[in-house]
Image: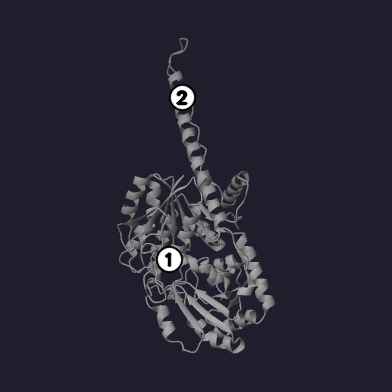
Amino acid sequence: MKICLVATFPPSGRQLNEYAFHIARELQRHPEIELTILADELANYEFATDQDGRPLSVDGQTELPGFNVIRCWKFGSALNPLRLLQTIRQLKPDVVWYNLVFSSFATPDNPFAAFAGLSTPALTRAAGFFTHITLHHIIEHVDFGAAGVKHEKLFRLGTDLATKALLAANSVSVLLPGYHRTLTTKYSARNVLLGTHGTFASFPTPPDFTKRGNPDKRILAIGHWGTYKRLETLMEAFPSVLEKVPNARLVVAGANHHTKAGYWESIRAAQPAHLPIEFRGYVPEEDIPELYQTTSIVVMPYDSATGSSGPAHQACEYGVPIVCADLADFRGMAADENMAILFHEVGNAAELAEQLIAILRSSELERQMAEQNFAAGVEMTMTNVVANYLRWFELKRTQGAVSKISKLSRRRRAWFDISRLSTPSSGHGASTSAFPQEREASSNFLDLEPARQYAGMNDYAAQCGERGAGSRETR
């Protein structure tokens, strides 16, 4: 099967580049898959950078070794649909898989380029290619105020149109039950699947508690900082944590959001020098395991949420307790995936400090939450998630082949019937009537109700011998 994955991709530092890397790495494990990554150009914007602001590369090379990457689209360009379609037509893939948020192609202050990019999946389908989208957030669940969006009413009108354009793809998967409900009720969408974000390790390693609290109890905050992911509440809370847990240490990792250059550096400059706070900047992929394995708590002190959380799923992968802001998306994520999370009121530094202290001062609570999160992570590895995508793609490809054969057979039957009826018979003359054309039965799996979509997908998975965590029952 030939797959084109349209995504940001390292060493690009833009949103979802790490997620695309893990999808691609897992696809590479399947010898029957021929993968081409259609990625964003690296020129004219920031690379991922280290803690000193230096652009990252791999052994001096631009691209990661072992991946077939074609950088054929450019962030902020209105020509992306033409450039992508031209490349896709040359490659002739069986599946075009888009890994998207609404700002993947451009920022809100460049709405024409953003809308043009989000229309590309519909154009890809219209060009005859099976098109799937993994959509990491939907606009109805985004706090525009926290995200810094101006002209909210006009922006919502435009994003409604963009959502309808995205839903013109063959199928769309979302990662939270609330997103599925919104798309099926507000937009009457019938091609929306409920998947899971997944953890990134193929074979998770159980937490080693000897690496934690030895000697520091590390609190990790990691992400793309500056918009809805902010650090002010955490910086206010941390001195109170130190009063109760003197060996606590705060590690801030990750890059700035591409619209907020210099944000975490300004936070670092504002902190007293004596506080045990380490600002690491972007963390290379090979350093992620050690970072999480030595962490006692992952903290997510966000102002709002725009989808299922990558740091939370990595915390589950390595068996780390989570403390995060009390947001509807995170409540749904915790309940749906059985994560162990303590919540604090958004912006409430005192309550955040209390939740951090409660875990750091109780080895029993820390171990209990860690083990629960690791158990959740084992159930949703990227291996299982990608396997379910591949089952879905293979099912649709098989159905497409069956549909073509069925249509060809009907054409042949119709030609035979008409030829036979147009021949004069035993003196009665030619027939002036034909058999009524039968209504074509739908062979499109996406025409089924959402619950039956997943029932069928699970039946198919069962035939293949396993049912992965990516195909959960529709709620």
Q: Residue at x 49, y 45 (%)?
A: 32
Which residue in the protein does label 1 denote?
Answer: 15
Task: Name the amino acid, label 1.
Answer: Gln
As helix, strand or loop, the secondary structure at mark 2 comes to loop
**Mark earlier in primary sequence (1, 2):** 1
For residue 152, side relative to residue 346 (left or right) = left
Q: Nearer the viewer, residue 170 or 50?
A: 50
- Residue designated by label 2: 434
Of residues 244 and 134, which is closer to you in this image?
244
**Residue 189 in view in this figure:** no
Question: For residue 210, which quarter of the picture?
Answer: bottom right
Q: Tell me whether the residue at label 1 lies in contact with that at label 2, contact meaning CB atoms closer than 8 angstroms.
A: no
Q: Which disc is residue 376 wearing?
A: none
Residue 287 appearing in the image: yes
Indicate whether 55 appears above or below 66.
below
- Residues packed near mark 2 inside 10 Å, few (<14), some (14 to 19) or many (20 plus): few
Please state the horizontal and vertical placement of residue 102, each as a whole percent of the image: 42, 63
Q: Nearer the viewer, residue 98 or 163?
A: 98
Q: Which image quarter: residue 213?
A: bottom right
Position in image of residue 5 (x %, y %): 43, 53
Q: Is residue 64 above or below residue 47?
A: above
